[in-house]
Amino acid sequence: MHYRALGRTGWKVSEISFGAWAIGGSWGKVSDEDSMAALHKAIDCGVNFIDTADVYGNGRSERLIAQLKKDRKEEIIAATKAGRRLPRQTVEGYSRQNLTAWIEDSLRNLSTDALDLVQLHGPPTELYHRPEAFAVLDDLVKAGKVRYYGVSVEKVEEALRAIEWPNVQTVQIIFNCFRQRPAELFFAQARQKQIGILARVPLASGLLTGKLRRDSVFAPDDHRNFNRHGEAFDVGETFAGVDYDVGLASVEEIRQLLPAGFSMSQFALRWILMFDAVSCAIPGGKRPEQVADNCRASDLPSLTPDAMAAVKSIYDEKIRPLVQARW
Ligand SMILES: NC(=O)c1ccc[n+]([C@@H]2O[C@H](COP(=O)([O-])OP(=O)(O)OC[C@H]3O[C@@H](n4cnc5c(N)ncnc54)[C@H](OP(=O)(O)O)[C@@H]3O)[C@@H](O)[C@H]2O)c1
């Protein structure tokens, strides 16, 4: 495992880290036993950074991470998020009272006195144009409840606006073979400001693992079933917002590019790591085998310029028209 600087925090994070949404909920049935085994495997593989949120299983994901931190002696940085407990996303919902209460809940669930990193969880675009929530976060840092804060955004424009706030340390954004736009303008600006970048949904919800088929079946409580068209939250969070059939066809083209010794997941993750601006990718993992497969991407050789160009042209031809203008 290799490590990269997380913006100005002074932390060096594993370039393949761990996304802890699926071990909380919304991905079908996952047992706590499997989740704990997946988390332990991640630490065994050198992962030192875990991304979660208060709403992943209503605190379940955070509590599993607290258990992991009790069980292990290694330093583990836990990034959580706040904002999705709101019944409706409004700027007013990110009030001092609400933010403080959410942070207190996360402190309890993560069993700690100070949260390592708190990210605003996909707030409305307007919030980035207003100082109030950032002032509250500054106060929570001063009070010692939060070490650093950042944002988790849907759109590149939100990311560009968010990094105008001087104490925003990190931006979490969807970045993968099917979502290439962040690499254009945002990465350059983020580098200039030394912002840590967390690449989320790196496997396009499993599409880029190459294992999904036209007739794959997802449980009713898996967002790949219930949010396929954005019924519950932003459609970009499910298969990166790419039409399922177009995604499957594009995956078959990517499969032709695999160098010897790479799994599809490793190729997709290695592609992300080719961008220096990225601090880490945070693939979700439900089982130890998935985690081990993903972590190996860090030690694989760089992709060739030809392979990078081929992924770009698959994106330009098939995917860009579906996603580029939207996010
Ligand atoms: N708004 C936000 O802030 C937001 C939104 C989305 C995600 N996130 C964060 O980003 C993280 C990653 O995104 P994600 O979990 O949505 O999607 P992802 O990482 O693109 O896909 C994860 C899923 O792919 C499958 N998988 C993973 N590794 C595999 C492997 N090696 N081989 C085969 N299958 C594999 C697993 O599901 P199956 O086994 O069921 O196929 C896993 O749950 C989340 O966990 C969360 O921390 C944040």
Image: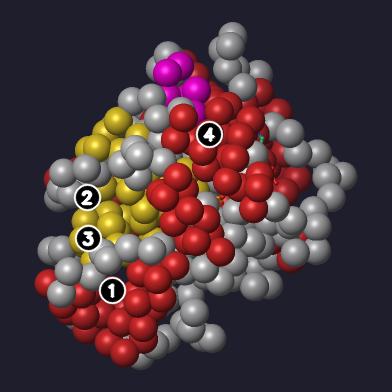
Q: Residue at x 44, y 56 (%)?
A: 66
Quadrant position of residue 49:
top left
The three-letter code of the residue at mark 2 reads: Ile
Q: Judge by depth and name the residue closer to the eye, 174 or 138.
A: 138
Q: Residue at x 35, y 90 (%)?
A: 92
Q: Magenta residues, as a range?
A: 294-300
Q: Residue beneath label 2, please?
A: 195
Q: Residue beneath label 4, please?
A: 41
| Residue sitting farthest toward the top | 260
Q: Nearer the viewer, mark 3 or mark 4?
A: 4
Image location of residue 136, percent across then percent down: 21, 80
Q: Residues within 10 Å of mark 1 (few under 14, many from 20)?
A: many
Residue 225 as seen in the image, left or right of residue 310: right
Q: Earlier in the sequence, mark 1 or mark 3?
A: 1
Q: Residue at x 21, y 61 (%)?
A: 147
Q: Judge by depth and name the residue closer to the eye, 179 or 310.
A: 179
Image location of residue 288, percent across then percent down: 61, 34
Q: Alpha carbon of mark 1 to alpha carbon of mark 4: how far?
A: 37 Å
Q: Earlier in the sequence, mark 2 or mark 4?
A: 4
Q: Which mark is residue 128?
A: 1
Q: Residue beneath label 3, please?
A: 148
Q: Alpha carbon of mark 1 to alpha carbon of mark 2: how far?
A: 16 Å
Mark 1 lies on a secondary structure that is helix
The three-letter code of the residue at mark 3 reads: Tyr
Q: Judge by depth and name the residue closer to the eye, 207 or 314.
A: 207
